[in-house]
Image (cartoon, helix red, strand yellow):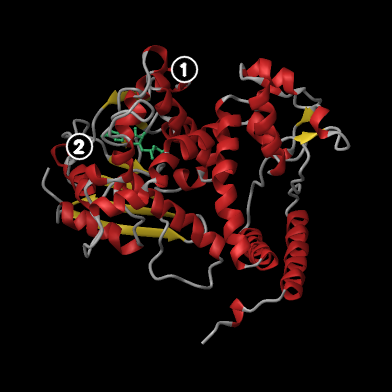
Amino acid sequence: MVDADLRPTLGSLGAKIKDLAESYERLLKENEIEAPTLAADSPVNISKFTPELFMTKQKLADAMNDLSIISQGPSESVFNYAHNVGPDMAALNIMNHFNFWNAVPASGSASIADIAKHTALPEEVVQRVIEHGTTLRYFAYTDNAAPSKSPIQHTSRSAALAKSPGLRALVASCIQDIMPPMAIMPEALERYSLGKPKTTKEMSETAFAMAHSGGEVFGNFANVWDYLENDGQGEKKGWRQRNFNAWMTYIKEIFGTKDVLLNAFDWKAAGEATVADIGGSGGHDAFELAEAYPNLKIVVQDLHECQPIFDQNVPSSLQSRVSFQEHDFFQPQRVHADVFFFKLIFHDWPDKESVEILQALRPALRRGAKVLFVEYMGKQGEIDASIPRSIRQFGTSTDLRMMALFNARERPVDAWKEIFRAADERFEVVRVDANPLTFMVVVEAVWRGEE
Ligand SMILES: C[S@@+](CC[C@H](N)C(=O)[O-])C[C@H]1O[C@@H](n2cnc3c(N)ncnc32)[C@H](O)[C@@H]1O
C-alpha cells in the first residue's frame, strides 16, 4: 500500500508550507520572539521555544524538504545532494577554521584582499571559498550587479558565527573531528562487520580508529578522547579538548537545556551535598549548578587537558565550592560523593565500557548514594511516525555518529535501566524521566549496598 503521504503535489505542499509558515509567524509574534531574517542584524537564534512553536517549525522543515525533493525530481535531488555535500562542508570548514567570520566587520564590508590579509590565505582561495559560501548564505555581495568585484558583507548565518565562539567550536568539532571517520564508515563496516549477524562493539574497530590509525594528517589515536587530549604540540596541545569544551558549553545555549540541568534533581533538598560531576569537561555545568545552589560542593572530574580550561574559567566566587580533579572514570572512584553526576557521558560508550564506568564507582559508594545521568536520548523506543522526520533525524544523526566514533548507539529508554542492572544489582533505578521534546532523559539510581 502506498502511503498518501508519498504522493504530495507541488501545489499541495506549497499550500501546506504557506499554512505552516503563517502559523509559525503567528506563534513567534504571540510569544514575543523576533523572527530571524537573512540579514546580518537578525537575532542569532530563536530562544524560548514552546512545544507548539517547536513542532510547527519542524513540520515546516519536513514540508520544505519534501517540496525541495519533488521540485527537483528524484535523481536530480540525489545528484544535487551528493554533488554539494562535500563542497558545502569544505567551504564551511575552511571559513570557520581560518575565521573568515571575524575578517568582515559586523556592519560594513571587506574586500577579498582584506579577508586574505586577515586569514593569511591566498586571495584566490578566499575568493573561491566565499563564492561557494554565498550560495549557502554565508556572506553576501554588497553589489549584486558586479559580484566578482564586490566587497563582502555578513548575512545572518555568517554574523551568527562571528558572534558566537560556541557555534564556531560546534562547527569545528562536528566537521573537523567527526567527518573524516564518517566518510570512511563503509570501509570500517566492510572490514569489521560485513557478513556478521551483529555489528562490532569493539572500540578498536570503529571508523574513527581506522581514520586515525597513522598517517600525517589524522595521526595515530586510539579513540576520540585520546585525540582531543593529545593532538597538537606545545601551545596547541589540548586545543581540540578546549574546542570540545566550548561546544559542550554552547549546547546549553542553542538547545536551551540549562533548565534540564538545574531541574534534573532536587538539588536544594540535597542539603550540604557533595556532587562529583564525572566527565564534567571544563566545569561549565558545575559552575551553573553551584551558582544556582549555594548548598552544593562540586568536584569536577575529567581528563588532563580539562584542568587548564577549568582553572581559566572558574569564577572566583565559586572557588571554595567547585574544584577540579584529574580522574579517569575507568579507575576506582576516590570521592565519596552524595551524588555522582554524569551528563552526556554514556551515549559515547558501548555497553561493556558503560558497565565498567559504573562499576568503577563502587569503592566510593555509600548506602543511599545517588547516581544521576542526564543523557541525550536519540532513540525513544519504537519509531513513532507521527513525530516529524526532521525531529527523528536529530536522533538518527547522533546514532550514526556514535557508530562511527565509538561503536556505541543511541539507547532507547529501557536500555538505561539495563546498564545499571548489568553493572551491579545493588543499583536501584528509581526514576527515568524522558522528555520527547528536549530529547533528554534523566535517570536516577540509588545504591542499596552496604556502607
Ligand atoms: C560528551 S562530553 C560531556 C561533557 C559534560 N559532561 C557536558 O555535559 O557538557 C564527555 C566528557 O567525557 C570526558 N571523558 C572521556 N573519557 C574520559 C575518561 N576516561 N575519564 C574521565 N573523563 C573522560 C571527556 O573529556 C569529555 O569532557
- Classify residue 107 as left or right of residue 70: right
Report the amino acid beneath label 2.
Phe
Query: Dot 1 corresponds to which residue?
Result: 316
User: Where is residue 217 shown, x and y percent of the image?
Assistant: 39, 28
In front of the other: 226 or 51? 226
Question: Which one is earlier in the sequence, the residue at label 1 or at label 2?
Answer: 1
Q: Which mark is residue 330?
A: 2
User: Where residue 138 sits in the image (x, y, percent)?
Assistant: 69, 38
Q: Residue furthest left?
A: 450
| Residue 319: percent from left, percent from top | 41, 20
- Judging depth in this view, the residue of 386 and 397 nearest the camera is 397
In the image shown, does 326 or 370 lie closer to the viewer? 326
Q: Is mark 2 within 8 Å of ligand 1?
A: yes
Question: Looking at the image, which residue is at 38% across and 20% down?
Answer: 232
Residue displayed at 36% across by 55% down: 410
Q: Secondary structure at mark 2?
A: loop
Q: Nearer the viewer, mark 1 or mark 2?
A: 2
Q: Residues within 10 Å of mark 1 (few under 14, many from 20)?
A: few
Q: Residues within 10 Å of mark 2 (few under 14, many from 20)?
A: some
| Any part of residue 211 in sight | yes
Where, by quadrant of the figure, is residue 433 drawn? bottom left
